[in-house]
């Protein structure tokens, strides 16, 4: 997805260029870490007088921030870069660059494949981006910078609070992963685990809350491993406690976690910490012990189910989502049925499901991809259909109940409208609507009067009564504002 920013008009363009300011356009694919990295790219370049634009035709620098988790990632990157080649034909001074995991993985090979590409850099070098771009411009040379920064030398870019009125924000707590699951490319593209000092994290949360952020999500490839690489640092459950104590913070979330690093102390923070939302994304990947061993996941089905039981004992209302991969090499019909059975046993609130695709450089890529594509398609369809029914039943239980909603802004839904509404959350034949998320991570929409609209700005906590369950959200009615916590 492209990172969109407010349109830059031509008069603003001329004024900025007159003052030696430049413009950068970034197209972003992939996970929350990539979205977060794009924000850091903007911050890093702002120090060099670059401003973001949503129009690549106005840009002096165009970057594609790539993801290599899914299949055909390199093809997607090459296609995007090819589409921007035409811009360089009209503007020879344009710098075109590739960032993210595919850039890290391919390095100089991308420069050889694409003679019009100027810059390739990995996630470890976002902070050096202004100097890299300047070297391209001044020295007229093409650069690939993909060396991993040593753990002891790694420096996290100090983030700035969002300037666009958002009331929710990501804050990274660590980078990299040490797990080496056989299907995953992350250790090769993001490097080893490095934890940010907890004092810096708490300070960042304080600054973000002071700027109007009400909900933060702590981000990392495996946040559960936080602190293990840094002598004397707190463990993740203690970090949650420290962030929970920040005055003015209303909600706290985190992602992503590994089941093997999910101690009782972490499970027991749910239902105990005021701000910690009742939602946990805990990827299982497969319900079969045999497949889990081939995936190098280092836990068993029984261990995973034990963690689920512990979480629900600590917080009976917790919503748990997961990841599922179907068609892993060697996955038999019996293995797949084990996955289907764990869906029924756990009853996840939602899941992200994928067909296995080999990633170059991973252990699984050396295995024969022996599950036919048609079988993968069938298995994926079964997983999605089963989860759709489970999610529908789970959401249906909230009909008639009151839930807490953190208002994020106008709704893009048109509840009850007979004519499509606008992106501003209004309908031609109905009142304006607002939207936000519940503590259990489901979007809720509710209509408001003109008075309520003015009295319910983004960041407001409200209570809303659920009137109907939609496929992936809730239709609600405002009850009161100023709520603290609800079930």
Image (cartoon, rainbow, N blue to C red):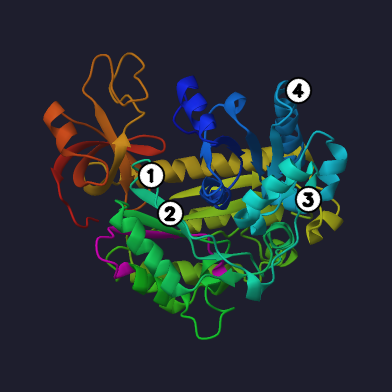
| Sequence-earlier tag: 2 or 4 | 4
Say if 109 sits above or below 184 in the image.
above
Q: Earlier in the sequence, mark 1 or mark 4?
A: 4
CB atoms of marks 3 and 4 within 8 Å: no
Q: Secondary structure at mark 3?
A: strand
In front: 111, or 238? 111
SS type, badge 4: helix
Q: Give the alpha-carbon distance from disc 3 to disc 4, as whole Å.
A: 22 Å
> Considering the image in quadrants, where does the N terminus appear?
top right
Residue with the mark numbered 4: 89
Q: Which residue is mark 1?
A: 163
- The residue under label 2 is 160
What kind of element bears circle 1?
loop
| Most foreground residue, 110 or 229 | 110
Residue at mark 2 to residue at mark 4: CA–CA distance: 35 Å
Q: Are marks 1 and 4 in contact (CB under 8 Å)?
A: no
Q: Residue at x 47, y 56 (%)?
A: 159
- Dot 3 crowding, Cα within 10 Å, few <14, some 14–19, many 20+: many
Q: Which residues are magenta?
A: 244-259
Q: Are the residues tagged 2 and 1 within 8 Å (C-beta)?
A: yes
Residue 315 magenta-drawn? no
Between the C-alphas of marks 1 and 3, the distance is 31 Å
Mark-to-mark CA distance, 2 and 3 = 27 Å
- Are there few (<14), some (14-19), or many (20+) residues within 10 Å of tag 2? few
Secondary structure category for the residue under label 2: loop
């Amino acid at each position: 997805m492209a990172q969109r920013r407010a349109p830059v008009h031509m008069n603003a363009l001329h004024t900025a260029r007159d003052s030696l300011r430049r413009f950068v356009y970034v197209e972003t694919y992939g996970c929350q870490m990539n979205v977060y990295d794009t924000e850091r790219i903007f911050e890093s370049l702002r120090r060099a007088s670059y401003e973001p634009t949503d129009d690549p035709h106005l840009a002096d620098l165009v970057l594609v921030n790539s993801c290599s988790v899914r299949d055909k990632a390199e093809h997607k990157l090459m296609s995007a870069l090819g589409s921007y080649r035409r811009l360089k034909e009209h503007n020879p001074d344009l710098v075109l660059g590739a960032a993210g995991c595919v850039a890290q993985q391919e390095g100089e090979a991308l420069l050889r494949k694409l003679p019009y590409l100027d810059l390739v850099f990995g996630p470890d070098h976002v902070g050096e981006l202004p100097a890299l771009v300047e070297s391209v411009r001044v020295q007229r040379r093409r650069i690939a910078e993909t060396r991993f920064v040593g753990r002891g030398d790694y420096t996290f870019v100090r983030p700035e609070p969002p300037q666009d009125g958002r009331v929710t924000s990501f804050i990274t707590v660590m980078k990299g992963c040490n797990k080496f699951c056989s299907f995953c490319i992350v250790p090769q593209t993001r490097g080893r685990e490095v934890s940010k000092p907890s004092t810096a994290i708490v300070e960042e949360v304080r600054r973000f809350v002071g700027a109007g952020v009400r909900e933060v999500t702590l981000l990392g490839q495996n946040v559960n491993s936080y602190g293990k690489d840094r002598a004397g640092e707190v463990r993740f459950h203690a970090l949650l406690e420290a962030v929970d104590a920040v005055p003015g913070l209303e909600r706290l979330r985190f992602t992503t976690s590994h089941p093997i690093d999910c101690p009782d102390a972490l499970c027991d923070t749910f239902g105990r910490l005021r701000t910690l939302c009742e939602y946990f994304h805990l990827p299982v990947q497969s319900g079969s012990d045999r497949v889990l061993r081939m995936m190098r996941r280092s836990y068993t089905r029984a261990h995973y189910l034990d963690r689920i039981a512990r979480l629900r004992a600590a917080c009976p209302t917790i919503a748990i989502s997961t990841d599922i991969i179907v068609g892993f090499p060697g996955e038999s019909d019996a293995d797949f049925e084990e996955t289907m059975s764990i869906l029924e046993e756990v009853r996840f609130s939602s899941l992200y499901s994928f067909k296995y695709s080999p990633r170059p450089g991973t252990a699984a890529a050396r295995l024969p991809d022996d599950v036919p594509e048609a079988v993968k398609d069938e298995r994926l369809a079964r997983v999605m259909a089963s989860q759709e029914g489970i999610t529908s039943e789970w959401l249906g239980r909230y009909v008639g109940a009151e839930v807490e909603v953190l208002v994020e802004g106008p709704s893009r839904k048109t509840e009850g409208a007979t004519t499509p509404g606008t992106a501003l959350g209004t309908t031609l034949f109905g009142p304006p609507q607002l939207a936000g998320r519940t503590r259990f991570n489901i979007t809720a929409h509710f209509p408001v009067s003109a008075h309520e609209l003015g009295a319910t700005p983004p960041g407001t906590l409200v209570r809303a009564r659920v009137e109907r369950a939609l496929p992936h959200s809730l239709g609600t009615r405002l009850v009161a504002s100023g709520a603290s916590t609800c079930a």
